[in-house]
Amino acid sequence: MLNLRAGEKAMSLATFLISASYLKAGIGLLRKDHWEKYYCLSLELYSLYAEAEYCNGNFQEVGHATGVVIKKAKSFEDKNRIFATLIKSLAGQNKMQDAMYIGFTVLT
């Protein structure tokens, strides 16, 4: 929980490398069954981590984190934020067709 708060604070200060390191550390501390026992914390850590790595231009990590959330999130509402990050990441890599495809798929 502390790593999540530290990551949020670092994001608010636009220190994305530090934020990503706090959030990744928080993810690393999660138990094996964290999605079942600590769903909200897991969702927040992974979602914010993906956003921080997007800001850092680390698109491979964005893809990994978004993939985990898309698989584990329980509802469409819980996936909205991660889909937005994924679409921005694809656009940032000039993969506009992929970004539009995901956008259209999510909206329909």
Image (spheres, helix red, strand yellow):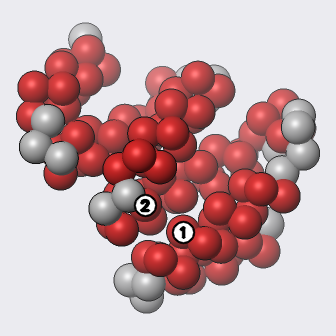
Q: Left or right: 41 with respect to 62? A: right
Amino acid type at image mark 1 = Ala
- Tell me the tag on residue 82: none
Q: Tell me which residue sits at (54%, 81%) in the image.
A: 18
- CA gap between label 1 and label 2 equals 6 Å
* Helix, strand or loop under label 2: helix
Regarding residue 78, the answer to whether it shows in the image is no
Q: Could you say where residue 71 lies in the image, as x and y percent from the top left?
A: 58, 23
* Helix, strand or loop under label 1: helix
Q: Could you say where residue 96 lies in the image, as x and y percent from the top left?
A: 9, 34
Q: Could you say where residue 99 lies in the image, as x and y percent from the top left?
A: 19, 31
Image height of 82 relative to 19, above or below: above
Q: Tell me which residue sits at (65%, 62%) in the image.
A: 24
Q: Could you say where residue 50 lies in the image, as x and y percent from the top left?
A: 47, 53
Q: Mark 2 highlights which residue?
A: 53
Mark 1 residue crowding within 10 angstroms, few (<14) / some (14–19) / many (20+): many
Given contact means CB atoms under 8 Å apart, are the residues at marks 1 and 2 in contact? yes
Regarding residue 83, the answer to whether it shows in the image is yes
Q: Mark 1 highlights which residue?
A: 20
Where on the picture, by quarter, is residue 83? top left
Front-most of residues 15 and 81: 15
Image height of 41 relative to 75, above or below: below
Q: Earlier in the sequence, mark 1 or mark 2?
A: 1
Q: Tell me which residue sits at (27%, 47%) in the image.
A: 89
Q: Left or right: 88 with respect to 41? A: left
Mark 2 residue crowding within 10 angstroms, few (<14) / some (14–19) / many (20+): many
Q: Tell me which residue sits at (43%, 60%) in the image.
A: 53
Q: Left or right: 3 with respect to 72? A: right
Where on the picture, by quarter, is residue 75? top right
Amino acid type at image mark 2 = Glu
